Image: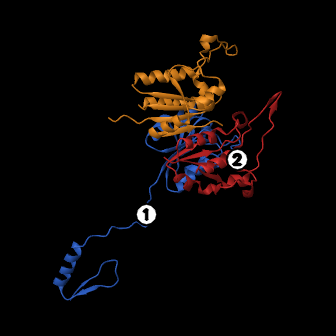
Amino acid sequence: MLTLQIIETAYRATLEEQDDPVMWITHAMRGAGAELAVLLRGNAVSYAVAGQDCSGLQFGAWKQAQPPRLVADLSSLLAKGVEVLAVEDDLVERGIATASLTEGIQLVARAKLAEVLERFPRIWHW
Amino acid sequence: MAALRRVDEETAVLFDDASALTRHLEAEAELPRSAPTAKHERTSMSRYLLIESRDPYAGNETGGYAALAGQLKSAGHDVALFLVQNGVLPVRAEARCAELRDAIGARVEVLADEFSLRERGIDAARVLTGVQVAPIALVIERLAAGWKTLWH
Amino acid sequence: MTKPQPLTFVLMDAPFESDRTTTAFRLLEAALEQGHDVNVFAYEGAVALSFARQARHPNAVHGRNEADEAHPLAREWIAALLQKAETKSLKVDWVNCGLCVDERGVAETISGVRRGGPPDFWAMAERAANTLVIATR
């Protein structure tokens, strides 16, 4: 059954996990054949911003070898045929220009969310 | 000569005589009736149960479910907003929460978890008009009945 | 009378971190009470809910010894739900996301729960009447 994954929380333990756990599980389920789409809302719209770099984390001699690459993960979902939408109002509120977004993101107005939700028989809000 | 004028028509249909009129009416009665068409065809409506666990006072980053509930209701869907945990904080009659009042005004079914109210010392008899106190079991009933259920 | 269909839940919060955990267990209890088989996919911190080494302690601030404090332990909540399911001839399928277990070092679990992954979650969702995701923040 086609399922919409709404991702709202952003940068929660992403450095520790080296990914966003909800994007990760979306990838994993897609790999198992699930039909999924993603809606980024709230702070999670930031995941679509190109040019993010969190490399260089170091504690004593410990250095992070694989920092999260959230934008690449998002692009990879798109490449797997997962539709990715973002709430435009949330971008505007955060001063994020649409030109700064990675390619393939579809914007939806907050006022149109009801229509978006109606397209999906199943919705999981993470 | 006989005449037949229906109440919603201005001009009459004329017949040579009463027999002709009768034959016309009998023939008309044998025709299949066309189904009346509704002015606004009702499309299939969904049922949404939005569970709001967060309060509007803690710098809620996107705004809670109250606004979304109103939007879905305006779109013609059945919508219930179930307030739980700190989500019940705005239900006191004296509380300030425009979004919740708007949802109630939009005829969203607003429910408050009985246990969460008790836990926070909110008198169930003194909540906003339009808020119903409900057991958590209601969430299971609605899930089982296929309501699209989202948690915030 | 037709048996109610299973319901699936996703939990993400570690024990002792959020009110969401208590509410989630209230929902699981209610689901069993209404005769549903219950599937739980424990993801991220929630894999620690079934960790076998959770231990009680006294509470000097409360003025109570260990026994009197009777501190709740999520592993006992799970065990109680498993027991309730058994007495009602229902099933609780509790699956911990394996990679999350490994990261957190909580592989030592109570009996009655199992290790799995995202395909298990998807399968649980597909066979349930409905699925509720209770995400962390």
Tell me what residue is drawn at x 52 percent, y 57 percent. Answer: B75
Q: Which residue is mark 1?
A: B41
What distance separates the C-alpha of mark 1 from that of mark 2?
43 Å
Q: Which amino acid, mark 1?
A: Glu
Q: Residue at x 51, y 34 (%)?
A: C120
Residue A76 drawn above or below residue C72: below
- Between A13 and B30, the one nearer to me in the picture: A13
Q: Is residue C35 left or right of residue A35?
A: left
Q: Quadrant of residue C102?
A: top right
In what element is the residue under mark 2?
Answer: helix
Which sits in the foreground, A106 or C99?
C99
Viewed as shown, does residue C124 lie left or right of A75? left
Local packing at callout 2 (Cα closer than 10 Å; few below 14, some 14-19, many 20+) is: many
Front residue of this view, candidates B1 and B67:
B67
Colour assignment, chain C = orange
Above or below: residue C84 compared with residue A40 = above
Q: Can the viewer see residue A6?
A: yes
The residue indicated by pointer 2 is: A71
| Residue B26 against residue C127 in the figure, above or below | below
